[in-house]
Amino acid sequence: MFEQGDNVNLESPAAPGEAGPENSNRTFIIVAGIFAGLVFLTLVCLAVYVLVIAPSQGGRKAAEAATVAAQNTQVSQAMTQTVEASLWTPTEPLASPTIEGLATETPVVALDGDTATPETDPLTATMAALNTQVAIALLTPTATLSATLVALPVGGFADEVGLPGLLIIALALALVILLARKLRSAPAR
């Protein structure tokens, strides 16, 4: 069918003035542009977060911490006042209401013999002593309370290297892509 001198290509040969197939790959340039746009958009979003969103969240967290501290102070004061009120005993007898113009005499009764002293209940005496110790401890601070902070677990690549390391790796991978493309399009020797 075909003889040795026949042109096997079904396409017509390119004229000397026409350009041959493109030396640069247009699709690669478009994809690289899209990736560059994504990287730029990511950097813009990161800048907005760092400069706008994070400071407002920090202020909100500080306000919440101040509110919690104020509430804790109120609760502590209320508890202190409750303990102080439970330990209070009147030092003077309360005046009984009297009707003016009505004179009453109370007869004095004298008892002969030994007068019995009322027995105190040991449980009542123990509770009174414990309440006194609690009141003294609340009024004189002997130890300061401190909140123990629990650190977040450390794990993952970003915790060890951080954002600068991630950017350097991204640039290195982009460089690898460009070099691979350049080497692939170079003529074989």
Image (cartoon, rainbow, N blue to C red):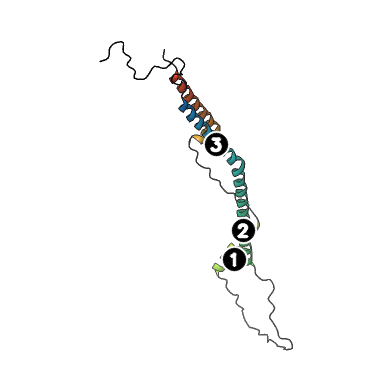
* Residue nearest the viewer, comparing 72 with 182: 182
Q: Quadrant of residue 73?
A: bottom right
**Label 2: how many Cα within 10 Å (few below 14, some 14–19, many 20+):** few
Frontmost of labels 1 and 2 is 2
* Residue nearest the viewer, comparing 88 with 180: 180
**Label 3: how many Cα within 10 Å (few below 14, some 14–19, many 20+):** few
From what the image shows, is residue 59 above or below residue 31? below
Position in image of residue 58 (x %, y %): 61, 46
Q: Determine whether, in the image, residue 184 is placed left or right of residue 46.
A: left
- The residue furthest top is 5
Whether residue 37 is visible here, answered yes or no, is yes
Position in image of residue 53 (x %, y %): 59, 44
Residue at x 62% of width, y 54% of height = 67
Q: Which residue is mark 1?
A: 128
Q: Which residue is mark 3?
A: 41
Residue 158 circle label: none
- The residue furthest left is 1
Marks 1/2: CA–CA distance:
21 Å
Q: Determine whether, in the image, residue 71 is placed left or right of residue 171.
A: right
Residue type for callout 2: Ser
- The secondary structure type at the circle numbered 1 is helix
Q: Which residue is mark 2?
A: 76
